[in-house]
Amino acid sequence: MENNNNKAVTENKMGVRPVGSLLFSMSLPAMASMMILALYNVVDSIFVSRFSEAALTAVSLAFPMQTLMIAFAVGLSIGMCSVISRRLGEKREDAALNAASTGYTILLTTTAVFTLIGLFLSAPFFSLYTDNPELLKMGTIYLRICIGLCLPTFILTYCEKVLQATGDTIHPMIIQASGAIFNIIFDPIFIFGYLGFPAMGIAGAALATVLGQAFAMIMGIIFVKRDRYVSIRFSKIRYDRVSATDIFKVGLPSVVMQGIGTIMTSLMNAILITYDILATTVFGVCFKLQSFVFMPVFGMNQGLMPILGYNYGARNRARMVSALKIALITALIIMTAGTVVIQLIPDKLFGLFNASPRLLEIGCTAFRLISLSYPLAAVSIILGSLFQALGDGYMSMITSIVRQILFLVPVSWLLGKIGGLHMIWYSFIISEFFALFMTLFFFSKENKKFKFD
């Protein structure tokens, strides 16, 4: 690892460029790449649904385990990103390098754990939900490939976050887009057996995913090695205990916050399957479709957090407040627009998945009700980025645990007992109201911290 000492490091744009143009210049590439990722997720499910409805159900039931893996990859990388951006704001380039090096070591260790999980626990995981031989076989094959071969996922995520921490959002967009485009092209080829390839079905969908991630990983390694502020030499990676402590302080709450979605989805599937197995399919499809609404906001978060972290390290409150206001307004506009579209054409959206009449009936009702919670979620998402940037990710973690586990799941179970499947979807609106209240409470406490009086 080296710091390019022969180059004069100029002032980072996160501390000097006008906030509005800075935020959008950093966010738009990330938003674009996240939209491409959302497109892949939906197209992948569309192709799988054309193979069979059972395959679509298997992929939906596999979603929690995939989410857990991604939670660790993204959560730990977010912790590293927060530390790097703050150290750069403090003009401590060597400490930023230590954080990048230590983050890589942590992610490699986590990769080994998930490889073992994918190879040996995929079948037991699926047996928790079904004893249907077809679903069990399809789901096990899919997870063993996607989780057992997870090294590219962790490394490409690491590379994206290192680059984002320095204010570079163009190269992370290229990394994300390259993998997603690869997946979109090769999904139908591997699933249905085009261009001389054998028809592999659901195994083909998983293989296209892994190979796409491997392609993106190669791109990421190339870009990180050339980075101006944090130039990594992967052959000289080392572990620094102080940096690790800082990474875990933000990263572990981020892992928990995102991993809570795995527990929530698993518990919701367990509740929904007692009413109709197609309800679990609807739940999975809703999450993939709503990614077109949430991904741009998450992309904005990727541009926002380094700005907040850098200017917090530089003690520049005015730039932090300005960036936060612009991000909140933009997120509310995006989420509200998404809600309106879903209210108008849910049948057209579910029709993309070769939906049966019953799947269409459940899906339209569910999607219309769930989407009403989106504008509320916008505020929680953006303010959560502030908590992470300031090194207080536990606030977002607590909000997520209470909303998704201690509130959403029990309320869903209770409403289902009272009014059946239709009533369960109202629980998403109720839980987001409660989450917004908690987020605003934590923000009032955090606001005192970054006044710098």
Image (cartoon, rainbow, N blue to C red):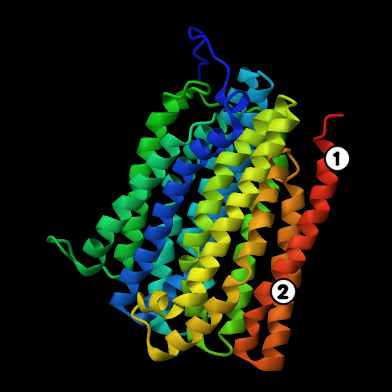
Q: Earlier in the sequence, mark 1 or mark 2?
A: 2
Amino acid type at mark 2: Ile
Residue 211 x, y percent position in the rendering? 32, 51
Helix, strand or loop at label 2? It is helix
Q: Determine which quarter of the picture holds residue 102.
A: top right
> Image check: 444 left or right of 278?
right
User: According to the image, label 1 marks what residue?
Assistant: 448
Q: Residue at x 37, y 59 (%)?
A: 40
Circles 1 and 2: CB distance less than 8 Å?
Answer: no
Mark 1 to mark 2: distance in Å? Answer: 29 Å
Residue 346 appears at what percent x and percent y? 46, 77
Asked if residue 247 shows in the view, the reply is yes
Residue at 79 percent of width and 62 percent of height: 437
Q: Nearer the viewer, residue 95 or 42?
A: 42
In the image, what residue occupies the spot 70% across and 43% down?
Answer: 386
- The residue identified by callout 2 is 430
Tell me the kind of residue under disc 1: Lys
